[in-house]
Structures are given as structure tokens and as C-alpha cells.
Amino acid sequence: MKNENDLESLIKDLVRKTPKQYNNLVMDSVSWIQKFHAGHRRLSGENYVFHALRVANIAADFNLDTDSVIAALLHSVLYRARGKDLEKILNKIDNIFGGDVYKLLKMLEKINEGTDSEETDREIITRYILNNAEDIRPILIKLADVLDDVRHIEYLSDEQIKTKATKVFDIYGPLASYLNLEEVRKEIEETAFKYRRNEDYEFIKQKMEDEGLNEELLNKYIEKLDMLTSNILDYKPKIFGRIKNKYSVYKKLKKMENEGRNTKISDINDRLALSIITQDKEDCFLIKMLLEEKAYIDERETDDYITNPKPNGFQALQVSAIFEDISYLFVEIQILTYRMYYINKYGPASHLAYKASKSRFATPTNSYDWLKQLHRKIMRSKYLRKQVRSVPIKADIFNENIYIFTPKDKIIELPKNATALDFAYRIHTNVGHRATYAEVDGKTQGLDAVLRTGQVVKIIPSEEKKYPKKEWLEFVVSPSTKDKIRRGLREKMVAYTSNSSSSTKL
């Protein structure tokens, strides 16, 4: 059980991490949450205030502004006061700590509601959260909350671990990637994997240990490449690497299995991967020639994407090599310039752009500029937090779509400017055919009502209707909706012709 010394240590850490001019404000919020959580205990038996303080400390470690840290500290009221008392408590917070903290908590509650939607495809939930985020800070607070929950996941029941792990794999891990929090993603995925699929985790862990895959080995490769490149370049290129995390190895093995391939961990070539970033393109080829002299190269796994870039603009030299003086493990080495690295990380060639476009062969485009713009804003907020109390991180993400709730909280993804009738047809063709009007956030609207993200829509059907109206084609937006309406009109014509023919025979 935690004691008063642990509590004081968390409070001191939080005050130390926040700008001095706001220390009193932070202490006021600490006092408020301590009173609110008097007698409240988590499954581990500890007072709830410990969790609140840890989440606030993580938010401060993210270099979020003071209002965000206060909102992180107060976030637990959203769980403890759900129902009729929540708005009353949030209004008190508004009066004491200001409208910005109030808005952050309201947006955080929207995220909670979205992740509670059990019927919705998880990728759609992730896109909804990002699309609905007029400010990224509540998402960062939510990730801080998840990180602390996962660090104490052993206190949950098996069913709770299953639910939490599924959300980590399908929602929170991808969110962390979008926001460039790779260390957070790795920790929450690894921990959730360990507790959700322990046998798989231990098997992969043992295999990686048998291969000597650890930070010590990684550092040996970095030192080796640093030594080799220093002999041929008059500057030091940037060299770094990573060991593929166990959950990523698991996903890769599953993918190989689904493709009917051997599922050997040794067949995953990027278990240990390194990058060498140079000042110009010529140096990339110079380093590749050096590696060919000093290491054994697997030509089957070596590609020149500088001379022949991928369709999405990805550029790099990719080399699979063994350095026998270090180990007999193949390592993947990527050689590229700073410009190539930037495009590959933030541009249309990035992994995130690939996920967003759902196309391995997406062509170069500026559609994903929000990736680099967002990361720039996050970096900017780190510098401004010392001068101002609130630093909003505005975003405009996945803006080509909108995300609408059914009355049962399922999230429906639709194209921008979609109407209530588009929503009806996305639910089911017959719901669209029989639609008469819609209720949008409880108010009666026509089927041509243009929707926006976050609204709750209910379609009111007529049992007497069977077919669509031709004029509907004039205001619907979704191509699939138009196709369903046209097919319905053809069915209506066939039925009419058949009935007319029967009447003539009589």
C-alpha cells in the first residue's frame, strides 16, 4: 500500500516539472483532487489520487502546458462522477480553474465515449478521435491515462485485461504512433501483449534472448557503423537503430501465417534495424560500397529505392548485412539523406500516410501534410509552456470524412458533407429505402440535412415504403449511397413493369 511519503514525492515531482509561476495553481488542483477522491480506491487498493498524480506527471513529461497538466490531474472525475452529477462537477472546475481546463475535460469525455463503442471497427474509432480533435491535448492526456493503467494492469480481471489490451492494440497504440510517441506505443503494446497473450510473449522473448537481441548488441552495431563511416566521410552521419518490439514480431508472424508462409522469427529480417542519415545522396552509395566490402550482404534483401523510388516517394538504400565480428544475425540497414528521412517520416511515404491511405502504392501527395504540421505544433508547445498557461495544439486530421453516432453509440464513417440519407444507407439499404426523416441530436431534420462529426442520428422509417425517390440523387454525397438508390430505382421499375403486365393479362 502506498504511504504519505509516496504521495508527497509525486506532488513534489509534479511541482518541479511545471513552470514556477504556475506552481500555486497546480497545488490548488492537487488539494482539490485530494478532497474529491477522499475514500476512493482503485482495484489495487491504493487511493485514487495516486493514479491522478501519476497521470499528471506523465502529462508534464510530455511537456504539455499547465492547463493540460491540471486537466490530467482532474481527469478521474470523468469516471467517478459519470451521470447526472458530472456536469455539475465540471461546472465547479470551470469556475475554479477556468474554461480551458473545462473544455479539455469535455473533449476527453468525448474520447472516452468513442472508445466505449463496442460495435465500431477499431480503426474507425482511431480516425474519429483524430478527426474530432480540434485540439490534440486531450488525446495526449488520454494516452497518459492509458500508460499508467497499463503499468498497473496486473490488478485487473482476465476479462478487463482482454478489453484493455484490445483497445491498446487497436486504438491507443495507433494513436501514439500518429502523435510521434513511439516509446509510449512500445511500452503499452509490450505490456498489454505480456498480460493478454503471455505464452506468445514468453516464446518470442526467449527466441530473441537466444539470438542475443538486446540494447548491448544494438550499441555494438551503432559503434561499428560509426567507426566505418568515420573513415570515409569528413563529418559524422546520424546513426541510430531499434530492436523490433515483441508485439510487432507477433503481428509479423501472424501476417506470415495468413499468407501461408513459414512462421520463423529468424525469417523476419528487420528484428534489428539501423539507419544511417547522410548529408547528400552520393554519400549513401559510398557507404553502401563500404558495407559490401566489410560485411556479408544478402542481395535478395537489398534494394536501391534512391535510383528507383517507391510509387509513394519513399527513398533509401536498404541493405541486409551480417557483421561476423559482432554476430551472425542479419541486420537491416537503411541509408538515406536527411531530406529523404524527413519525407519518409512525415510525407506521403511515411508509415502513417500508408495507414491513412490504406494503400501500399499510394502516389506522392500533400494529403498527409498534417503529419508534419502536427508534430511541429507539438514541438512548439514544449517551448511556449514556460511562458503561457495554455498552449492549444490545433489539428485538422482526416478532414475528408465525418464520424456520426447511432443511438446505440456505433460510429459510422461518412464522406465530408454527407447527409442524413447517406447515414441511413450506410446503416442498411432497406433503412435508406424506407427513410422518411431523421432526428439529429434529438431534433427533427430532413433527409437532406448535412451532418458533422459527433452528432447522434436516428432514422425514422416508414413500413409502407419500399423504394427510394429519384430526387434523392440530387443531395446525397456518398458514391455507395447513389449506387444503392439507382439500384433501388431499377428494382422499382421492374416491379412496376411486372405489376402492369399482370394487370394487362387480367
Image (tube, rainbow, N blue to C red):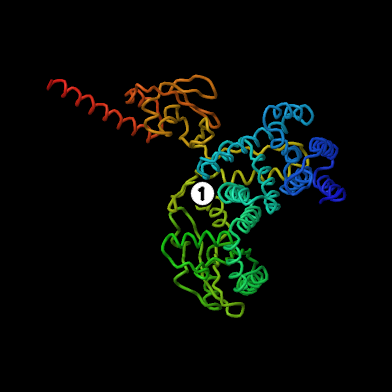
User: Residue 307 placed where, x, y %?
Assistant: 45, 62
Q: Residue at x 57, y 51 (%)?
A: 169
At a point 54% along the width and 57% down the height, the residue shown is 340
- Viewer-closest of 155 and 73: 155
Indicate left or right for 380 with 124 as reference. Answer: right
Q: Secondary structure at mark 1?
A: helix
Residue 278 can be seen, yes or no: no
Query: To which quarter of the image does residue 134 belong?
Result: top right
Q: How many marks are shown on the rendered structure?
A: 1
Check the picture and name the quadrant holding the C terminus. Answer: top left
Q: Quadrant of residue 33?
A: top right
Q: Is residue 371 above or below residue 475?
A: below
The residue lying toward the viewer, choosing from 65 and 431, is 431
Sort mark 1 into few (<14), some (14-19) or many (20+) by Cα contacts within 10 Å: many
Percent coordinates x, y for residue 444 in the rendering = 49, 19
Vertically, is 60 above or below 405?
Answer: below
Q: Residue furthest left?
A: 505
Q: Nearer the viewer, residue 110 or 160?
A: 160
Viewer-nearest residue: 475 or 320: 475
* Residue appearing at x 48%, y 74% in the figure: 298
Evaluate whether residue 346 shows in this view: yes
From what the image shows, is residue 199 above or below residue 50? below
- Tell me which residue sits at (19%, 26%) in the image: 498
Q: Position of residue 237 (x, y in %)?
A: 63, 65
Q: Is residue 370 left or right of residue 30?
A: left
Q: Amino acid at mark 1?
A: Ala
Residue 187: give x, y in percent of width and height.
Answer: 65, 56
Q: Which residue is mark 1?
A: 353
